[in-house]
Amino acid sequence: MLKPFDVMLVGVGGQGTLLATKVLAKAAQKKGYDIKVSEIKGMAQRGGSVVSQVRLAEKVHSPLITEGGADVILSFEKLEALRWLEYLKPGGTIIINNQSINPVPVLTGAAEYPSGVVEYIREKVNNTKVVNALETAVNCGSARTANVVLLGVLARYMPIEKETWLEALEEVVPDKFKKVNNSAFAAGYTI
């Protein structure tokens, strides 16, 4: 029997959230899960929020995760982690990329980026994992693979074997980027 598992991937346009969602869905499908995915792209190409809800089970009837229902939230940016925190279930895990991307109100001077975001979340969530995915990705050869570093971290918290993730990555990522993405996944998996 496949244990139900709900994951939210939250980030900002341009961070590769949707590619990460495709790899996750492919890996879950290979494992035999029924999968439902819901994606919200708010002006994603202009730095707006991008949210993917991925539900896995023997049979999934709705793609939407309710507040307090996510087993894991994978956040590609700190403020997005805070924005979607109420969706994490009690005892759930939040993985946060320790990166700040200023939203439009901050860029225009109408607001300030809040300080202490990670500390606040750590006070609320015992299972908080903070990762410097961008630095790790650069060390692997490309800053653009930070999303795959984060997938590597996520993989350790999910009921899907590492080999299945690698097969999914192989099928989703274009040939010319496979080597660097495999390195990024492996690096994230060891964090």
Image (tube, rainbow, N blue to C red):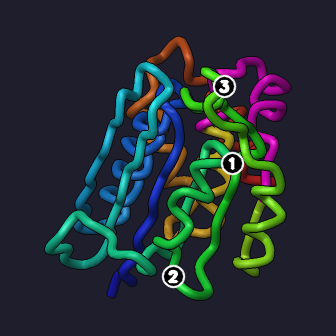
Q: Quadrant of residue 136?
A: top right
Q: Amino acid at mark 1?
A: Lys
Evaluate if marks 3 and 1 touch, with contact meaning CB atoms under 8 Å apart. Answer: no
Identify which residue is drawn at 55% across, 63% down: 73
| Mark 3 residue crowding within 10 angstroms, few (<14) / some (14–19) / many (20+) | few
Q: Is residue 133 magenta?
A: yes
Q: How many marks?
A: 3
Report the residue marked by disc 3: 109
Picture coordinates of residue 131, whole percent (x, y): 79, 50
Q: Quadrant of residue 67?
A: bottom left
Picture coordinates of residue 173, whole percent (x, y): 45, 27
Identity of the residue furthest to the front in this view: 110
Picture coordinates of residue 102, whole percent (x, y): 65, 30
Q: Earlier in the sequence, mark 1 or mark 2?
A: 1
Label 3, label 2: how far apart the Cα atoms are: 34 Å
94 and 47: which is toward the camera: 47
Report the residue marked by disc 2: 89
Identity of the residue furthest to the top in this view: 176
Looking at the image, residue 81 sits to the left or right of residue 4; the answer is right
Q: Is residue 28 magenta?
A: no
Vertical position of residue 71 compared to residue 185: above or below: below
Looking at the image, residue 149 sits to the left or right of residue 58; the answer is right
60 and 51: which is toward the camera: 51
Q: Earlier in the sequence, mark 3 or mark 1?
A: 1
Identity of the residue furthest to the left in this view: 61
Q: Secondary structure at mark 1?
A: helix
Evaluate if marks 1 and 2 touch, with contact meaning CB atoms under 8 Å apart. Answer: no
Tell me the magenta residue range. Answer: 130-147
129 and 136: which is toward the camera: 129
Identify which residue is drawn at 68% across, 48% down: 78
Picture coordinates of residue 38, whole percent (x, y): 26, 53
Report the residue marked by disc 1: 78
